[in-house]
Every structure is written in C-alpha cells, then in structure tokens.
Image (cartoon, rainbow, N blue to C red):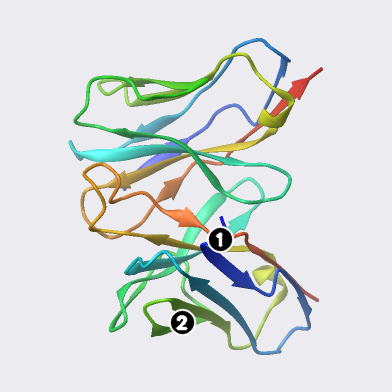
Amino acid sequence: DADVTQTPRNRITKTGKRIMLECSQTKGHDRMYWYRQDPGLGLRLIYYSFDVKDINKGEISDGYSVSRQAQAKFSLSLESAIPNQTALYFCATSDPRALAGAEETQYFGPGTRLLVL
Amino acid sequence: AQTVTQSQPEMSVQEAETVTLSCTYDTSESNYYLFWYKQPPSRQMILVIRQEAYKQQNATENRFSVNFQKAAKSFSLKISDSQLGDTAMYFCAFHGSSNTGKLIFGQGTTLQVKP
C-alpha cells in the first residue's frame, strides 16, 4: 500500500552506529506505530503515537527512540545499533475516526530490513 | 496479559482446495477486535479480514472467511478455492478495547499452495 512508505527498504550497518528509519503516510491518519518482526515471534510493538504531541512506549522500546515530526511522519532511531536489533521493521497507521469496526484496523508500510553486523 | 497462539507453524494445500488456519487467544476483555494479516514473500503486511467481538456473525471476504468462537476464544481462517497467490505467512492479531493501540500478533503460519 503506497499510502504508507518506509525508507530505506534495506539497510546494513555496524554495531555502535546510529541509524534512523523513516515512515511517511498520506492516509491522513492520526495514529502511527513502529513494530519489529523476528522469526517465530510475530510482530512486536516498539513505540506508538496517537498524535504529534503523544509518544508512548510499546513492549520492546529499550534501545530505540522515536520522533513524530508531523502528522504524516514518524521516525524510529537506533542510537547505538547492536546485532540483536537485526530484524524487519514495520510502520503502521490507523484512524480512530474510521467507521465503526474499522477504527482499530492498522495499515502497514512495506517494511525495512535491517542487518546489524 | 493478552496472548495469541498459532499452533501450526507450516501448512500446505493443493490448489483449488480448502484450508483452515487456527488461532486461539487469551483475554479477559469482552469487547475486542481480531484480524488476519497475510505476508507474501514481498513481506508486505496485507489485511485479509477483520472481526469485531460484539458481532456474532462470522466475517467473510470473498474466498476468506472466519470461524469465530468467542466462548472458546478461537478465531480460525478458512481459505476456499486456494490459489497459488495465497502462498504466504498468515498472522492472527488481537486488539483490545483498552485503547493502547497495540496489536498483539501470533507467531504466524506459513501456508504453501501447491499446483
């Protein structure tokens, strides 16, 4: 779904480096999320934001930080990358004003594959 | 804490046949949402189907349907007339009513459709 874009799509970095993953959306949704996917574990929530002034930690926020620069932009940073942060990272959005039953539906970007050496 | 379990890591089905993927969950909430997402080799997460817990009628989207058993906390996905393009990993996900925004995912089931 081109409405949610992530850059870069693939990234290789070294231990200790700072890296930023970016997410942009044209869906006009207020809510944005960052997840990571590891084999056998499904997706787990890192951070989420319900609006520009709202940032909340998810279940695995240690080692990560985020910035909500605008309604449409939500960035994830790894301040000092380590090998166990190697994973597939997804950004997602949702619209609390959607029709009943659809307000909790999350729409995902294409993912960023990160390898930390 | 809510949990989602998909007990079938891998499944296969012949093209044109029907397959059912299992999902169970644990929650103390009475109102919540359940989802099935598909992740093909392109790795894009695609919404397949959604079910609101307050609705007794099972959701259906073309060849995809669910069997939602609230008392048993079971939410299985049935794919009818399987197609090669259905080959993907399928994730079951839970969203509670506590408004944390959190989707809780199962471990995933890899489905291969064979010609």
Comparing B37 with A42, the one in front is: B37
Amino acid marked by disc 1: Gly
Task: Kindly state the secondary structure of the residue where label 1 is placed.
Answer: loop
Q: Does residue B28 appear in this view? A: no
Q: Is residue B24 left or right of residue A97?
A: right
How far across and down, in percent of the image, does residue A36 sit? 56, 62
Q: Is residue B56 left or right of residue B107?
A: left
How far across and down, in percent of the image, does residue B15 sit? 73, 15
The residue that mark 1 highlights is A109
What's the residue at 57%, 68% (across, down)?
A5
Q: CA distance from mark 1 to mark 2?
A: 17 Å
**Residue B44 versus residue B10 in the image, above or below:** below
Q: Are marks 1 and 2 in contact (CB under 8 Å)?
A: no
How far across and down, in percent of the image, does residue B84 sit? 74, 26
Q: Are marks 1 and 2 on the same chain?
A: yes
Task: Kindly state the secondary structure of the residue where label 2 is placed.
Answer: strand
Chain of the residue where label 1 is placed in the rendered structure: A
Camera-near label (1 vs 2) is: 1
**Residue A90 versus residue B29 in the image, above or below:** below
Amino acid marked by disc 2: Val
Q: Is residue B29 left or right of residue B17?
A: left
**Residue A4 versus residue B28 in the image, above or below:** below
The disc placed on residue A66 is: 2
The answer to which image quadrant residue B72 occupies is top left
Which tag, 1 or 2, sits closer to the chain's start? 2
Crowd class of label 1 (few under 14; some 14 to 19; many from 20; radius 10 Å): many
Chain of the residue where label 2 is placed in the rendered structure: A
Q: Is residue B42 left or right of residue B25?
A: right
**Residue A99 versus residue B22 in the image, above or below:** below
Q: Does residue B75 appear in this view? A: yes
